[in-house]
Structures are given as C-alpha cells and as structure tokens.
Image (spheres, rainbow, N blue to C red):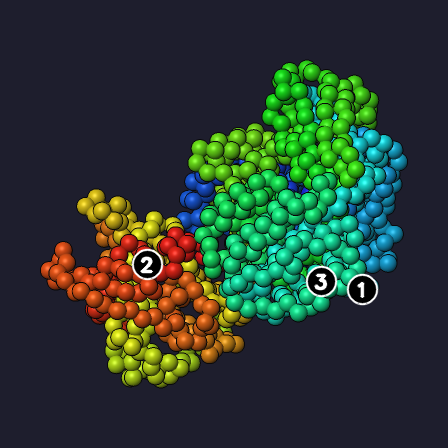
Amino acid sequence: VDGIEIYSMKIDSKVTSRFAHNVITSRAVNRGNVSKEVFFDVELPKTAFITNFSMTIDGVNYPGTIKEKEAAKKQYEKAVSRGQTAGLVKASGRKTEKFTVSVNIKAASKVTFELTYEELLKRQFGKYEMFIKVKPKQLVKDFEIEVDVFEPQGITELEAEGTFITNELQNTIKKTFSGKKGHISFKPTLDQQRTCANCSQSVLDGDFTVRYDVKRTTPDNLQIVNGYFVHFFAPTNLPKLSKNIIFVLDTSGSMIGREIEQTKEALLKILDDIKEDDFFNFILFDSEISTWKETLIKATPENLDEARKFVRQISAQGATNLHGGLMRGIDILNAAHEENLVPKRSASIIIMLTDGQPNVGVSNTHEIEKAVKKAIDGRYTLYNLGFGSGVDYGFLERMALENKGLARRIYPDSDAALQLQGFYDEVSNPMLIDVELNYPENEISDLTTNSFKHFYDGSEIVVAGRFLDSNQNHLSVDVRGEGANDALSYTTQQDAEQTAQAFQEQQYIFGEYIERLWAYLTIEQLLEKRLTATGEEKENLTAQALALSLMYKFVTPLTSMVVTKPEENGNEEGIADKPTEVLNMYLKNLLSKPGTCVVYAKLLLIVKLISIKPSFITKSYGQTSPLYHTYASPPTWYTSVDGDPHFIISVPQKKDAICFNINENPGMILNLINDPVTGITVNGELIGDKRANSGAKIQNSYFGKLGIANKQLDVKLTVTPETITIQNGDEKTGFTWLDSVTLQQAGLTLIINRKKNLVLSMGSGASFVVVLHQVWKKHPLHQDFLGLYTLKSDKLSEQTHGLLGQFFRPIDFTILEIHPGSDPKKPDATMIVKNNELTVTRGWQKDYRRDPKHGVDIPCWFVHDNGAGLIDGVHTDYVVSSLF
C-alpha cells in the first residue's frame, strides 16, 4: 500500500495453564524511492496487559520502556510541545484496544515491529476463550497464526473459528490435540487471502477465536512452580441451586424508544429460561417506584405467563430514582429471607439496568453507594448493567464491586437484547454459594482473593499465591462451599514433584508463567479494590499495584510504555497507556476515519457563504440580528450561571430575580440541566484562580469546561475557554474561539462568534448561549472562564432537573420584613420560598450576554449557603463524576 509492503506477519500464542503469552511480529519494507511512513496497527483484548514492544529499523533496535505513568508523562511532554507525537493505545471496540505506532523509513529500508501481551483466559459457558483480531489491511506474503496450548490436566476439546473464514479458507485452519498438548495454525497463501481471483484486497478482517476446555477428574487442580502456586476450582456435576432474582429496571424518559423495547425483548427471553424452582420479581423506577408483586414469586408456568403480560406493557417516562428502585429490591429480598419464603440454600441476585444518572430522591452517588452497601450487608450479589454512554459507569462499577458483583456495559446497538440475555446466561446457573478456599496462613503470603459469593456453572475460580519459603514444594487446601442439598467440604493436596511430572514437555512452557499469572491476577484485583477505596487505603493499593506493574513490566492504568523512534530531526517519543473503562466510551481513534478533513472543508465553505456577522441579543430583546429569529420574541426571562458560579433565576411574574452561589473546589463537576425526556443534559466543571487568594475566606471558582449533550441527536458539545468540540456519534470536529462558524445539521445549529460567545439551538428545543470571558494573560490571579445562559427553556420537559434546570418551571416567593443588613447598600429580608423561611440579601449579579467584558447589573435577592432552602436537596447532590 503506497509503496509500503508488509511481507510478513506472525501471531504466536503460547497458552500454559490458562495464561496466554502472545507475540505479534510484523515485517515491512519501503519499496518506494522516497522516505515513507509505516504503520503498525494491532487490536488486543482489553483484559490483556502489554508487556513489551520494540522496533528494529535496518538492524538498529528501538525498545519500549515501561515506567510509572507520571515519569513517562514528563519524558513525553517535551515531545508533545513540539507537536510530534501521539498516544499509542486507544479504546477501539467493545472488547478491544488499538495499539498504533508509525515511523518514517528510508527508501528500500526494512522495519520489524514486535508487540508482546499477556492475559489470563477466563472460563465461561464451559470453555476458555482467546480471541485474536486479524486485520493486516493488505495481502501479506507470509501470514501465520500459531497457537500452542499446554494444560497439565489434559485437553478435552479444542476449536478455532474466524468471522472472516470462507469455505475455501476453512481447510487452512490446522488443528490437533492429544493429552496435554494442543496446536492450531492458520497460514493462508496470497491467493487464499484475496477477496476475489484478481483482487488486491484482503479477506482477512475480523476475529479469530480459539476455545478449549480441560479434563476434570477432580473438582480442582493445584500447581506449584518455583515458590508460587495457582489453584483452579471448577467442580462439575453438582446439582443446580435455585435462585432468587430481582430485576431492578430504569423506565425513565431517556429509555423511551429502542432501549425500552430491547430491554423488554431480553426480559421475555429470560423468562423462558427461568427454572420452576426459582423465585423472581420486577422493580421499575422512574420518578416513582413500582413493583410487579409485593414479594418474590415462584416461577410457576402461571406466574411466568402473568410476568410476560407485565413485561409487554412496561413503558418509559419520568426522571431517575435509582436509589428508590434498588432499596425496594433489597427490602423485598430481605423480607423473603426473613419470612422463609425462599429456600435457605439458594442464591440471591439483584440485576439492575439503567441508562442514566440518578436525579430524583437520593441523587448523590456516594450516598447511594453507602446506603446500598449497608442494606445488602454482604448477603446478596449486585450486578449493574449500564445501557449506553449516559451512565456514570464508575459509580455502577464501584457499587457492584462493593456488593460482590460486577458492572457491565450494554452497547446501544441492534444486538443490545442479546447482550442483556448473554449476561443473564452467565449468572443464571449458580451451583455453590459462599465458597472459601483456605490456605495455611503460616506458609503463604500475597494471596489473591480466596472467598467468593457464588460459583456459576461453566465458570472457574482461580486463586494464586506466593510461598513464604520459596523452596516449599507441597500445599494443602481446605475447600468449603454451600451446595443445593448439602455443604461441600474437602481437603486437596499437591506437591511440586507432581506438577513437574505434569510439565515434562518443557518446550511448551514460557518463563516463570505461574509467577506471572500470580502477578497479573494480583494487579487486576488491586486495581479493582482501588476503585472503591479512599484515603490511605487507596494510596497503599496504588503503591502495591504500581510496584508489581513495574517489576513484571505490565502496561496497566498506573504505568506507561515510552517508545522512542528515529525521525529525521532526531528521535521522537510516543507513549502507550492502558485506557480506563470510563474513557473507553469517548476516546475513539477518530483520526483513522477518512472524511474528517472533508467534513472540516465543508464547514469552512459554510462559514464563507454566511457573511452576516451576528451581533448579540440587545437589552430590549426585540431588535436582534436576522440569524437569531428563532428566539427573537420573548421570553425575556432566563436562567443563567456566570462569574464565580453566580446562578440567576428570573421570576417574571414578580419582575424580579433570585440568585445564589455554589462554593466548591476546582475540578468538581456539577449537573446544571438534565432532561430525561428530551435527552438534553448540561454539566459544568469548576476551575479556580491560578493560586489561592490569601485574603479571601472563600476562594473564587468559575466554570472552565461545559458539556452539553443531546442523547436523541447523539451529539456532545464540549466547550473550554480555548476550544469547542462537537462530537456527532463517533465523528469529532474541533474549533477554537478564533473561528467564526455557523454549522447546521439535522436538528441543530451552532454559531460561534469569534472570541465572544456561541449559540447552540437544538431544533424546536432549548437554546444555550455560552459566553467566553478572557482575562489579561499575565493576571496574577484570574484565568479565562465561561458563562451559560438558557433561552427557550420552556421547550424542555416538566421533568427537567439540575442546579439550573429545576427552575425552568415557575417558582414563586414572598419577601417580608426588609431591614438593614451588614452592608448599608444591601438590605436583608425574609423570603418564603418552597415552604422555607430564608434570610436573603438584596444585591446585583452581572448579565454578560450583551457585554462579556463589563456585564449589565441585574438586581436580585441573594440566597446564602449554596442556595440552601431554595434548591432541591443540597448542592452536593448535583456533583457528578464526568462531563457526560
């Protein structure tokens, strides 16, 4: 392609006792007569850790080095300031991350890329699965995938398939296994790679998946090598436990349409799979909480029929009382156990599905986490399913992990119902509860998690540890668990000699594989625990995970790999980070998309065609420039937030206004507007002054970043004092405040008035004005910030909430007893509002829409203490964890 020929690509995987060590080697040559850029693009599983990378150019090797993230960042920042580099790892799909490196090579030069990554294969539905992403993007003369599996227990089945495999390619997959060894190879010729006889396109584009399982003559398997052990526990032929399952479902307005229909489709299929010994119930939450039945109900054929009728008539509307829904579910489970409605030996599970963030009832996520953990008290498992990108996934994950469950993203695609059903299938067959694997404390250190709430059919429990005496070669383990009919209890033993006999075929074993398996599992669990920890505990977990990541050279969320590559003007550095789940939904590798430049060119064209320079809305609100005709008429009243979070609430019937401040720390993100019906949300991130003002009791804070999202249009607008970014689905377009732009697309108009303000209009919906405040660059204290004004707020629904949004509905107040205050120019008074009696002060706030520099004074009644008594709840209820 373009003079660059990839003449060899080899993917070599060695799996020993479920631990996979993968090496991808790609060789390319520049066939052109000038220097060319060569790209190495690999997609690898999110569950894997990169352990090594190197480039060899004309015999010179350029290795990657793994460092603490902060140290790597410093090394990298110099290069970034020269505009040379790019991050190397990006989230790219549901299960994958993309590693990309490019380098310029001279004419006739050769380059070899080599990437190594490792992962522990998980067992699901009775099989271990390893998938390899195949996408060479051109025909490759020497293409090969080779997989060697070595399992001391013996292999019972081994299969390989590719989503791109045609009938002709089927015969190129060679597969053999006997005893403990398995081998798979896939080596298509150049002609077999072609999409048609004379085509130059490659058919190799998709997933290559290997699945296998091992012999199980005993419930578990212990292996000891060089002072480390691993214990695999997966008993078979146990009677199934009955389960008590509560589905807690978000039916708020944002679920309207495809999401609620797909949820109902999945629930109907799940009802077909529920066993007659199971108990179940449905809790629905929107602004209110409703239940199908008051107690858990046995899954008789009659009850299942009634449940199907109930599911079919579920509809979506209202806000999101997530706390109320979960607490009702926990109460029903508690009552069922207390009243012996359910068998003593049964597994109790809560599955909660939401597509948004709590905004009614208790909406502070930290309060919800505390309340749910206290109510569950370790008795039940909570699984949280986050539908789409509007969820606070960090919150869902923390809450699930604190209650012995896990969180899972449900991607809003055509197969969302299958994703929901697939998750249910994973947890639908509990075989044991309260499983504990106990090891002699005086012999073992650094043990991974060894107690598990549930063991599910087709899965496997893995525990690893380190011996205090590295020469110890025997181990005895007590295993306990509760089954359907009786308790499981036995002791298992193993010594290093037995393991050595099982590992006679040494060529199949790479390095210190059990030690690396232990390190991988330990880091994974420390990072999980770190999510829910705070303070000193979090610092300790971070330090442990970082030390292990550096010692075993894993790229984890705490480390980065710096890759140095030669360029004509000296060496250049790139950085490889492990993307975190929260970022995964937003950090798409957009530059790889053709068309980004085309879109930008079209925008420039539109700007040139529209030569009218819009002036801003005048004080009379009647004389507006033609471009503003959509809201030239009243309402003349508005809600806004500007300056040191100064919220102004207009009360038209009083011809007056109420104002309040929010005093919070920089970095805090506040929910300003949230409309579950139209799907519009606005959040703002606070910034402070450049340094603390020693003379001030309360430090200044301003909005330094605003995020405006419209879920229905799949649009996100991020505004900072430097840049304006609009994301439409996966397409991202960026502007700066130096641009003058009018962008029009389906249902949306964005106008940027250079260095002044921007106006965002959403079809017949609300319009927002963001004002840019620029201060003198050398100002010792202040920095640039933003103001937000809402126009046509009546176009948002009745259920709109948030610090600003709650005031879009009419609000009334009465002023009594005006009397002198501490400032002679600003009298105090008593205000009756929302049945609260508040002391308020007469003052002025600035309206900066017409004059961003000086503003216009607006008289208002100031409510103290972060709006206490005026806003619903307390101001911390509106703190959210991310901009979208």
Asked whether the beta carbons under mark 1 and mark 2 sit within 8 Å of each other, the answer is no
Q: Is residue 732 left or right of residue 28?
A: left
Q: Give me the C-alpha separation between circle 1 and circle 2.
A: 72 Å
**Where, quadrant-wise, is the N terminus in this rendering?**
bottom right
Q: Residues within 10 Å of mark 1 (few under 14, many from 20)?
A: few
Task: Give whichever of discs 3 and 1 has the lower sequence position.
Answer: 1
Q: Quadrant of residue 304?
A: bottom right
**Residue 60: image x %, image y %?**
59, 37
Q: Residues within 10 Å of mark 2 (few under 14, many from 20)?
A: some
**Residue 161: image x %, image y %?**
80, 51
**SS at mark 1 in the image:** loop
**Residue 227: image x %, image y %?**
67, 20
Question: Residue under circle 2?
Answer: 869
| Closer to the camera in the image, 728 or 261 | 261
**SS at mark 3 in the image:** helix
Residue at the image position 72 percent from the left and 20 percent from the top: 475
Residue at the image position 29 percent from the left and 69 percent from the top: 813
Question: Residue under circle 3?
Answer: 307
Q: Is residue 276 left or right of residue 843?
A: right
Question: Residue under circle 1?
Answer: 196
